Image (cartoon, rainbow, N blue to C red):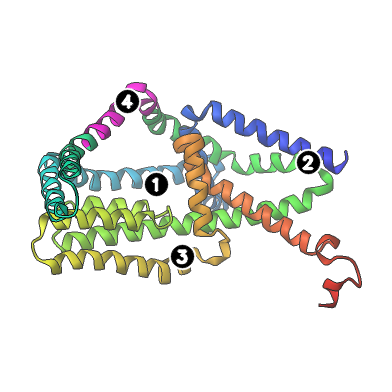
Amino acid sequence: MTAPRQALFWIGVAAVFVAILALLSDIMLPFVAGLAVAYFLDPLADRVERRGAPRALAATLVLAVFFLAFVAVLLLIVPMLEAQLLSLLGQLPEIGAHVRGVLAGLLAKLSARVSPEHIEQARQAAADLPQRLVSWILSLIDDAWRSGVALLNLIGLLVVTPVVSWYLLRDWDRLIAQVDGWLPRAHRAVIREQCGLIDDTLAGFVRGQATVCLILGGAYALALELAGLQYGLVVGLISGLISFIPYVGSLVGLALSLGLAVIQFDEPLRIVLIAVIFVAGQAIEGNFLTPKLVGERVGLHAVWVLFAMLAGGSLFGFVGVLLAVPVAAVIGVLVRFGLAHYLESEIYRGGAGGPDDRE
């Protein structure tokens, strides 16, 4: 088979995969989550297996410890989060009234420069904004649950994901060997090398970034609670856990914290303290945590990861967000592979003795 025909074949395979993913994206979440769990727990299962345990027993032990630890963390954190979330929802009218008061003060200062008609329109919009925002959020939640997709995915995550994880983890090495046997003979060595680079990139980035998110979530929550900010636990954990999306976690946390601080505190210094917490957290993340735990060796730039997540979410919803980093890792490795071959080719060099060679 010629190179162009091989390229068309693999393009067709990729197109079929994307089409299947688009058609089944509503039910793929438990399976994608199970695949992710099996992938990241496989090294631990391998260690248990090397100590003499059968593979099935190793998979069972590793998954049991993982899910028990996950449930224990939820049992410890969820009650506190629930209390703060319920309190926050109960104070939404008060927060809305405060926002309206702030906006009304700003409009009063602008009244001397703007026509009365425009001022009245802006005042009416400011009065309706909090109610519209709350109504929009509640309608989104209601539509999601009414569609049944959220409930189906929740049941799938609770029931299907552990089953899928166990089967994949038990058969992981056998599946890898089987896929390896399907590789084209002429290109097996190159494909193995690139798959190894993809595995190193993906594992290094996701495992390191997960550690960064957990550290930041705990640090933000503790610092905000010590600073006396109401709902600091909720805001801190949310900020840390979504910091895997570059720049978004710290910006969302800063905006939420400052908004709550302006409502809660009268002293400007305490509001500045809240801002300092996030500035310090971003500095520590960028200069210490990310370089040490993730590192530049993974080759995934923050802007590229952000674009991949936005594109994946836009195309395939939450499943696309989960698949964004693996796909970004694959594309990044393949682009570097193609660039390396281009730099060694006659297309780049311009032929022996050409003007580029003399430079």
Q: CA distance from mark 2 to mark 3?
A: 37 Å
Return the disc, 1 or 2, that comes first in the chain's sequence: 2
Q: Earlier in the sequence, mark 4 or mark 1?
A: 1
Q: CA distance from mark 3 to mark 4?
A: 39 Å
Whole-percent x, y for residue 246 in the image: 43, 56
Number of other residues with Cα within 10 Å of mark 3, as a class: few under 14, some 14 to 19, many 20 or more: some
Look at mark 2 in the image and give the residue it sits on. 7
Type of amino acid at the residue the image marks with label 1: Val
User: With 275 as the anchor, is 240 left or right in this view?
Assistant: right
Q: Which mark is residue 259?
A: none
Query: Quick one: SS at disc 1?
Result: helix
Choose mark 1 or mark 2, whichever is in front.
2
The disc, 3 or 4, on the residue closer to the chain's N-terminal end is 4
Q: Which mark is residue 65?
A: 1
Viewer-nearest residue: 53 or 129: 129
Read off the magenta span: 134-152
Task: Name the N-terminal-most of marks 4 and 2.
Answer: 2
Q: Is residue 59 visible?
A: no
Local crowd size for mark 1, using a 10 Å CA cut-off: few (<14), some (14–19), many (≥20): few
The residue indicated by pointer 4 is 143
Q: Nearer the viewer, residue 300 or 204?
A: 300
The answer to whether residue 259 is above or below residue 64 is below
Residue 293 is tagged as 3
Residue 257 in view: yes
Query: Which corner quadrant of the image does residue 88 belong to?
Result: top left
Q: Quadrant location of the C terminus? A: bottom right
Q: Is residue 147 left or right of residue 321?
A: left
